[in-house]
């Protein structure tokens, strides 16, 4: 059993990508399913329970396995896979320990879904028993993201954009293993994945926080099940993009405030000699904005932007904007006080700025609370 909190994973092995005796099969401590995911593409999932197995074979009955688009493993080493032979057969070889899930995305020809599947119980096994199997219906597309939290942990969002309701969630990590889960009704599976017994209604998003070393190259398969249907998605690590955009937004906001106040003070000839510090600050901020923009472009070009999209990103941008305004007002206030002491025409400027600063701080508090409320609402599923 790979889930220590409830019996979800045993169900998910047959439900997440299968749901009947014809679509999700088990034999010798393994379960497998085949699901069409796009035109001419099918996703094979193999879950190993118990003793180590040493590979598997798949050949189509009324379709042809044409090639391999990707091979990924969760909870163990990725096997070596190839397509060859007559009939064309997918061959994957390597030690597959208990708790591992292997995902092979195949390119295919033909419209059928019947296939035969065999396991290798020892290295180089040639005494194979092929089990007749049938693919299941395509999964409902899910949305989601994978990122890091501020304390160095991991954070996954699972979004349900459709009208179906789900009762179970599963995260199959690629390139990392969860060691603990902070989200209620969730637990760590034997392969370092995450399984949750919690609802995910139409239009809802769930947030799952966990302890793991999530790197920039990490990814995950997301599954949702309801006993009769399945949702699925594959997401790559995308945590930096919202944070980078928030940083750009904050710097833009700060620079805009400093520029506008500098323009007002520059109208006074007597004030101009006192503005060198603010002018240098504007130059520094402009450099920081450009650096942040370059970081954002690098992030988007890496293909992580779409994966980073999350339901609360707009709130995160609002926090960045509000913090930038506070920072800008704090920057200009000392200079305005010095100038007000010498220039009668600008004597009221510090008081006005102080009022704006108080309002900006209140805006930060509201934006921060809105972000926290949004995050909390997501966690409710």
Image: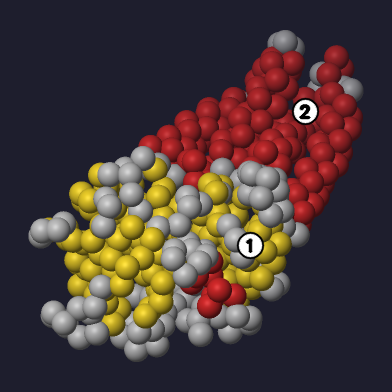
Say if mark 1 contacts mark 2, CB within 8 Å.
no
Q: How is the image coloured?
A: secondary structure
Tell me residue 43's x, y (percent).
37, 55
Residue at the disc numbered 1: 226
In front of the other: 244 or 281: 244
The answer to whether residue 13 shows anywhere in this view is yes
Q: Which residue lies most toward the bottom here?
A: 51
* Residue at 13 percent of width and 79 percent of height: 126
* Residue at 47 percent of width and 50 percent of height: 138
**Badge number at residue 336:** 2
Is the C terminus in the top left, top right, bottom left or bottom right quadrant?
bottom right
Tell me residue 115's x, y (percent).
30, 61
Q: Residues within 10 Å of mark 1 (few under 14, many from 20)?
A: many
Q: Is residue 51 above or below residue 352?
A: below
Mark-to-mark CA distance, 1 and 2 = 62 Å
Q: Which residue lies most toward the left here?
A: 85
**Which element is circle 2 on?**
helix
Tell me residue 52's x, y (percent).
31, 85
Q: Disc 1 or 2, which lies upstream in sequence?
A: 1
Of circles 1 and 2, the one toward us is 1
The answer to whether 6 appears left or right of 358 in the picture is left
The answer to whether 186 appears left or right of 283 in the picture is right
The answer to whether residue 172 shows anywhere in this view is no
Q: Is residue 142 above or below residue 229?
A: above
Q: Is residue 56 above or below residue 61?
A: below
* Residue at 47 percent of width and 70 percent of height: 21
Tell me residue 78's x, y (percent).
28, 69
* Residue at 36 percent of width and 40 percent of height: 39
**Which element is circle 1 on?**
loop
In front of the other: 339 or 352: 352
The answer to whether 134 appears left or right of 334 in the picture is left
């Amino acid at each position: 059993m790979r889930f220590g909190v409830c019996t979800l994973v045993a169900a998910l092995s047959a439900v997440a990508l299968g749901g009947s005796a014809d679509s999700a099969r088990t034999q010798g401590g393994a379960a497998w399913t085949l699901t069409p995911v796009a035109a001419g593409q099918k996703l094979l999932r193999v879950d190993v329970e118990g003793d180590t197995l040493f590979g598997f074979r798949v050949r189509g009955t009324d379709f042809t396995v044409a090639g391999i688009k990707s091979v990924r493993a969760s909870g163990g080493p990725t096997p070596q896979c190839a397509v060859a032979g007559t009939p064309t057969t997918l061959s994957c070889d390597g030690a597959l320990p208990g708790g591992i899930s292997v995902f092979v995305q195949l390119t295919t020809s033909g419209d059928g879904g019947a296939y035969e599947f065999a396991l290798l119980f020892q290295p180089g096994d040639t005494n194979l028993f092929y089990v007749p199997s049938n693919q299941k219906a395509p999964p409902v597309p899910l949305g989601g993201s994978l990122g890091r939290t501020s304390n160095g942990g991991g954070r996954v969002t699972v979004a349900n954009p459709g009208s179906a309701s789900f009762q179970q969630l599963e995260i199959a990590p690629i390139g990392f293993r969860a060691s603990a889960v902070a989200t209620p009704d969730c637990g760590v599976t034997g392969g370092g994945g995450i399984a949750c017994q919690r609802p995910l209604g139409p239009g809802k998003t769930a947030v799952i926080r966990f302890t793991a070393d999530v790197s920039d190259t990490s990814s995950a398969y997301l599954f949702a099940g309801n006993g009769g249907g399945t949702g699925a998605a594959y997401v790559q690590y995308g945590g930096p993009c919202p944070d980078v955009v928030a940083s750009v937004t904050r710097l833009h906001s700060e620079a805009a405030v400093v520029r506008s106040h500098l323009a007002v003070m520059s109208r006074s000839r007597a004030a101009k000699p006192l503005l060198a510090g603010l002018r240098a600050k504007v130059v520094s901020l402009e450099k920081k904005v450009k650096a942040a923009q370059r970081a954002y472009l690098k992030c988007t070009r890496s293909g992580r932007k779409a994966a980073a999209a999350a339901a609360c990103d707009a709130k995160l941008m609002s926090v960045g904007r509000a913090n930038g305004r506070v920072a800008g007002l704090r920057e200009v206030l000392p200079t305005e006080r010095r100038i007000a002491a010498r220039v009668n025409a600008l004597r009221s400027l510090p008081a006005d700025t102080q009022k704006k600063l108080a309002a900006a701080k209140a805006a930060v508090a509201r934006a921060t609370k809105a972000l926290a409320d949004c995050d909390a609402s997501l966690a409710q599923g």
